[in-house]
Amino acid sequence: PSVLGGALLDDERHHGATGPRQRAVELVDWGASLTMAEAKQMFLLFESASGVALFERLEADVVASGVAAVRAASDSFATFSKLVALRAVQPFTSLDDALAQANDVSEGVLSDSLRAFLEQSMPRVKPGKKSKYVLGVADDKLATAVSEAMRVRCARGSVVAELLRGVRAHFTRYVTELKGGNWEKAQLGLGHAYSRARVKFNVNRADNMIIQAINVLDQIDKDLNTNAMRLREWYAYTFPELTKIVPEHAQYARVARFVGNKADWCKLVATDGADADAAAPGAVHHRL
């Protein structure tokens, strides 16, 4: 296990027995594999649009084999259900409750209801002790909040992400009440409510359209200048004199389109003779 981003182990390891007392915040960063000793008991916290759920890992051998083994087991629910089992579910009571929980998760805040759910569903941790199990959490900020508040080791990394991906893929098989499009409806409703709330939180929302319009105009002007310079650079290989003759970008593009290959134009003028030379300036002016 490694300590991430300002996380602290117990005092004796950092400050000695007489050092200042600080809260232990331990995030276990697991990459490609987990050892059997580190993952004797493991839970997974899954947040969905319909509620929060707690899963428990059953087979440690598959998880210890690495990401590829977990991904292979996730392809089939029959195989994945032997690897991960549903332990507890707490559905949201209303759309407002779901929106509040989603806002807390996005900000890395451990809400009272989520903490009560975890304390009720997972083994209790004795005061002054650390948990003998780990909790897989997808969000780093939420993992830090859980570790600080509940003294629970929180796991993150590619293996945990792959396990949660399998849970998300087969969630309606675990919770059969969400079949028939109910989960999709919950996701759609929460997505709309979350987006509206985020827009409402923006105090400068009235100026957003003006700012975006100015940015679009600046981007268009930049793209036009870039393309014009590229046209001049490429067309200079066949007609280098035109760059000084026509300084304006739009007029330069029209002339280049009309003239085309200068060698072909010179051949045409030479075969037409003096009459073509006399008529060419007027024709060119008319076309441009």
Image (cartoon, grey):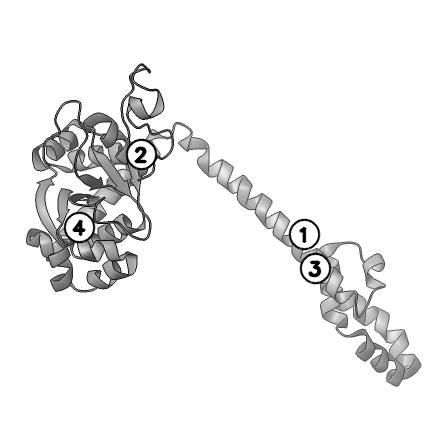
How far from the left and from the top, in percent, is residue 256? 74, 67
Q: Quadrant of the C terminus?
A: bottom right
Farthest bottom residue in view = 271
- The answer for how far apart the CA atoms under marks 4 and 2 are is 28 Å
Q: Earlier in the sequence, mark 4 or mark 2?
A: 2
At 49% from the left and 36% from the top, the residue drawn is 210
Q: Which residue is tagged 2?
A: 141
Secondary element at tag 2: helix
Residue 225 tag number:
1
Location of residue 225 with respect to 29 vertically, above or below: below
Residue type (three-letter) at the residue carrying disc 2: Lys
Secondary element at tag 4: helix
Residue type (three-letter) at the residue carrying disc 3: Arg
Q: Quadrant of the N terminus?
A: top left
Q: Which residue is tagged 3?
A: 230
Residue 181 appears anywhere in the view: no
